[in-house]
C-alpha cells in the first residue's frame, strides 16, 4: 500500500506574508499621499507668490534735495512705495507644512525599510531616517549616533542612507547647505515657531544711470535692503550744467525676493539669508528624486511600480524659481 506524503503548509507564514504585502502597499500609498500633500503646499505657495511678484507690488518715488550752498548740485534719492504687502505669515505657514510632509516622507521610508528587512518580526522601536552633518557623529557609538535609528535595516539600506548624508563625498557643495541638512534645521525651527520669511530686493535686476543731458553724475550708489515702505533703492549726486535744458534718467528694474530671516543669535543658522523659493525647491526635489525615486523607493517596491510613477504632476515639485 502506497503512502502519499502530504506537504504541510504553515498557515502562519502565509498570513504573515499576506499581511506584509498589505503593509507595503499601505506604506507606498501613505508615502504617495504625503508627497501629494507636499506638492499641494508648494502649489498653494506659488499660487499666492506669483500674483504678488508679477502684480507690481511696488512703485518707485524720487525725492530731491538741493545742496545748501551750491544751487547747481542736487541730491536725489529713489525709494520704494509698496502697493501690495507680501503675505509673509501665510508663506511661512505653508513652508512649515511643506517641511513637515517632506520630513515625514523620510521617516516613513526608513520605517518601511526596517519593516521589510525585519519581516516577519516588527521593526525595532526608535527607527527613523538620521540626518547628520559630520561623519564622526554619524558613526558614533551609542544613542547619539545614527545606529539606533538604523536598527533592523539591511546593509543595503544603511549604505543608501549614508550616501545621502551631507558629509558624503558625492555632495560637492558645502555640507551645511545640503538639502537634507537644511530640511533638518528648518524642521527643527518649525517645531517651535514658523520659519521667519522676509521680503527684500537683495537682487537688483538692473539699476544704473541711463540717459543724461547737460548733467554730470558726481556719485551714484545702488542699495540693497528690506522690501518695505520707504526703503532706499539708490542715491545720486548730480551737477546741472544747464539750469533749464538738463535731464537725467535712472534705469530701475528690481527683483523682489523673499529669504529666510533669522533674528539675533540664530543668525548662524545655515538657512539664514537663503532665498525661500530656491531653498524649498532644492529640498523638495532632493527628497522626491534622490531619496524616493533613485534610492529607497527602488529598494522597497518593485521597479515596475516605481517606474510607473514617472514624476506625475500630483507629486512633482511645482516650483518656479525667480532669479
Image: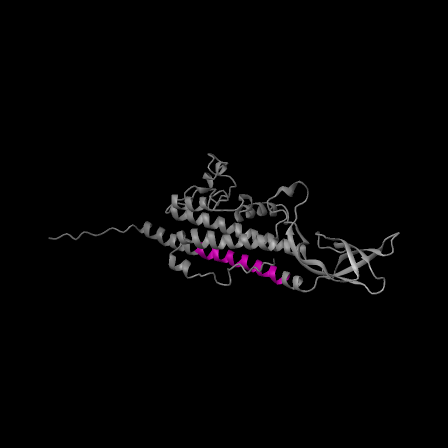
Q: Is residue 162 above or below residue 29?
A: above
Q: Is 30 within the magenta? A: yes
Colour convention of the picture: one colour
Would you say 190 lies left or right of 80 here? left
Q: Is residue 47 above or below residue 196?
A: below
Say which of 34 and 88 sits in front.
88
User: Would residue 85 be seen by someone viewing this image from the given angle?
Assistant: no
Q: Which residues are magenta?
A: 26-48
Q: Which residue does the image show at 53% across and 44% down from the upper left?
A: 175
Q: Which residue does the image show at 56% across and 51% down from the upper left?
A: 100
Q: Magenta segment, principal secondary structure?
A: helix
Query: What is the tally of numbered marks visible in this picture?
Result: 0
Quadrant of image for the C terminus: bottom right
- Indicate the position of residue 63 as horizontal and vertical percent values: 81, 58
- Indicate the position of residue 267 as horizontal and vertical percent values: 65, 43
Q: Quadrant of residue 217?
A: bottom right
Q: Is 288 within the magenta? A: no
Give the farthest residue toward the right: 69
Q: Which residue does the image show at 41% across and 60% down from the upper left?
A: 307
- Indicate the position of residue 276 as horizontal and vertical percent values: 61, 53
Give the farthest residue toward the top: 141
Say which of 28 and 253 sits in front.
253
Q: Which residue does the image show at 68% across and 42% down from the upper left?
A: 264
User: Would residue 267 be seen by someone viewing this image from the given angle?
Assistant: yes
- Indicate the position of residue 34 as horizontal and vertical percent values: 51, 56
Give the farthest residue toward the left: 1
Would you say 306 lies left or right of 85 here? left
Would you say 200 lies left or right of 39 here? right
Amino acid at each position: 500500500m502506497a503512502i502519499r506524503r502530504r506537504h504541510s503548509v504553515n498557515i502562519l507564514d502565509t498570513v504573515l506574508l499576506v499581511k506584509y504585502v498589505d503593509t507595503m502597499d499601505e506604506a507606498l500609498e501613505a508615502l504617495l499621499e504625503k508627497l501629494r500633500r507636499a506638492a499641494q503646499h508648494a502649489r498653494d505657495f506659488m499660487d499666492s507668490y506669483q500674483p504678488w511678484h508679477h502684480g507690481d507690488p511696488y512703485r518707485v518715488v524720487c525725492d530731491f534735495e538741493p545742496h545748501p550752498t551750491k544751487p547747481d548740485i542736487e541730491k536725489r534719492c529713489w525709494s520704494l512705495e509698496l502697493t501690495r504687502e507680501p503675505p509673509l505669515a501665510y508663506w511661512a505657514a505653508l513652508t512649515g507644512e511643506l517641511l513637515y510632509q517632506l520630513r515625514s516622507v523620510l521617516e516613513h521610508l526608513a520605517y518601511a525599510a526596517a519593516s521589510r528587512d525585519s519581516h516577519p518580526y516588527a521593526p525595532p522601536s526608535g527607527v527613523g531616517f538620521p540626518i547628520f552633518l559630520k561623519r564622526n557623529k554619524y558613526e558614533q557609538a551609542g544613542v547619539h549616533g545614527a545606529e539606533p535609528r538604523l536598527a533592523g535595516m539591511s546593509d543595503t539600506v544603511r549604505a543608501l542612507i549614508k550616501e545621502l548624508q551631507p558629509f558624503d563625498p558625492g555632495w560637492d557643495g558645502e555640507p551645511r547647505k545640503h538639502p537634507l541638512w537644511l530640511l533638518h534645521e528648518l524642521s527643527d525651527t518649525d517645531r517651535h515657531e514658523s520659519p521667519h520669511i522676509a521680503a527684500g530686493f537683495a537682487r537688483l535686476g538692473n539699476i544704473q544711470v541711463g540717459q543724461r543731458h547737460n548733467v554730470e553724475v558726481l556719485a551714484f550708489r545702488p542699495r540693497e535692503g528690506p522690501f518695505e515702505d520707504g526703503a532706499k533703492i539708490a542715491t545720486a549726486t548730480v551737477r546741472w550744467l544747464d539750469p533749464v535744458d538738463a535731464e537725467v534718467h535712472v534705469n530701475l528694474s528690481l527683483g523682489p525676493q523673499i529669504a529666510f530671516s533669522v533674528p539675533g543669535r540664530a543668525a548662524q543658522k545655515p538657512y539664514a539669508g537663503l532665498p525661500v523659493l530656491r531653498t524649498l525647491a532644492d529640498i523638495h526635489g532632493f527628497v522626491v528624486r534622490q531619496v524616493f525615486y533613485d534610492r529607497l523607493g527602488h529598494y522597497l517596491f518593485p521597479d515596475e511600480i516605481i517606474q510607473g510613477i514617472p514624476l506625475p504632476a500630483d507629486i512633482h515639485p511645482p516650483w518656479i524659481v525667480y532669479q
